Image: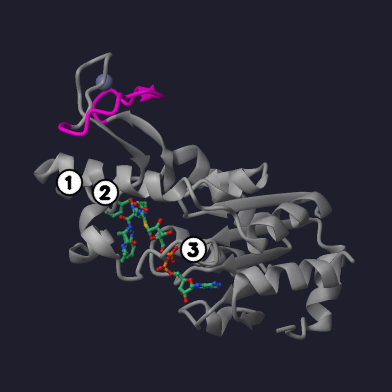
Amino acid sequence: MTMEIPSDLIRFLRKANRVAVLTGAGVSQESGLRTFRDPQTGLWAQYKPTDLASPEAFARDPKLVWDWYAWRREALKGVRPNAGHYALVEMEKRVPEFTLITQNVDNLHRFAGSRNVLELHGNIQRVRCSECRTFTEDWGDDTEAVPHCNVCGGLLRPDVVWSGENLPRLELEAAVQAARKCDVFFSVGTSGVVQPAASLAFAAHNKGAVVVEVNAESTPLTPKADFFLQGKSGELLPELVAEVWK
Ligand code: BV8
Ligand code: ZN
């Protein structure tokens, strides 16, 4: 399905020096990953992600939360980036100053080859201590208990940001700067409900950036966007990159 990319958007992008892109779970949907608010399947169908991705859930039942992330890491082993991820890698090569800001923890942007990636919500492939924050690469595969930190004995946890937890300061500050300074801001595959990530597009808009939303459905951002390309990012982004930088 080739959608008509508006000609004035093509013109903007050809002369843009600074482009910032915010992505959400929708950009990984065509890689076969459920989005964050899609119903879970199988063993995890009975749980809502928002109930598991929280410090309270981890405090209440660390093993359940640890197993959910172990299951997600396992599920990711067979998952590959899709054409939307690769279109963003191409865009990064073509734009003088390009910043990719992602809410996704699935590591697919890095896997696809994106270089300047700001992971606002962490990365599921990284594991750290819940007490002393020491990172660890190997935690054994004891499935009976949550592994412990070999520095302080604390419980290990995924290096992701749970609801109510602060975002990594350096990444968030860099994302705010990129949103404020960019000529064009893309919001791709996100429902725009999670803060403070969802406020970045509005910050860009308030600073006069051209805001482009690429999403399967409209969101609270849509009325403010200069361009709303409704559809699949895995189809629309490659089409847009080909049109602008063919
Ligand atoms: C914080 C990691 C300071 C874990 C995640 C201000 C106002 C209101 C609430 C708050 C606020 N400030 C803070 C809050 C509370 C909270 C919040 O925003 N709650 C919301 C839910 C109301 N925010 C926080 O707690 C943040 N911390 O602000 O700290 C603080 C501390 C205490 C008190 C106040 C402030 C931390 C938020 C981080 C949470 N961690 N993930 C994990 O993943 O396991 S969030 C989780 O949601 C994922 O990271 C996900 O990326 C993210 C956002 O969801 P989306 O990516 O948008 O995914 P979703 O499924 O919703 O939408 C997908 C979209 O894609 C859909 O629109 C769909 O139509 C579209 N789509 C689908 N397929 C395609 C497609 N589009 C294109 N192509 C396709 N093929
Ligand atoms: Zn520790």
- Corner quadrant of residue 229: bottom right
- The residue sitting at 57% across, 67% down in the picture is 188
Element type at marker 2?
Answer: helix
Q: Which mark is residue 47?
A: none
- The residue sitting at 9% across, 45% down in the picture is 60
Q: CA distance from mark 1 to mark 2?
A: 6 Å
Element type at marker 1?
Answer: helix
Residue for badge 2: 68
Across and down, in percent, residue 117 comes to: 60, 45
Q: Is residue 232 left or right of residue 137?
A: right
Across and down, in percent, residue 141 comes to: 28, 28
Residue for badge 1: 64
Ligand 1 lies under 8 Å from the Cβ of mark 2: no
Mark 2 is on which residue type? Trp
> Magenta span covers which residues?
130-145
Residue for badge 3: 32
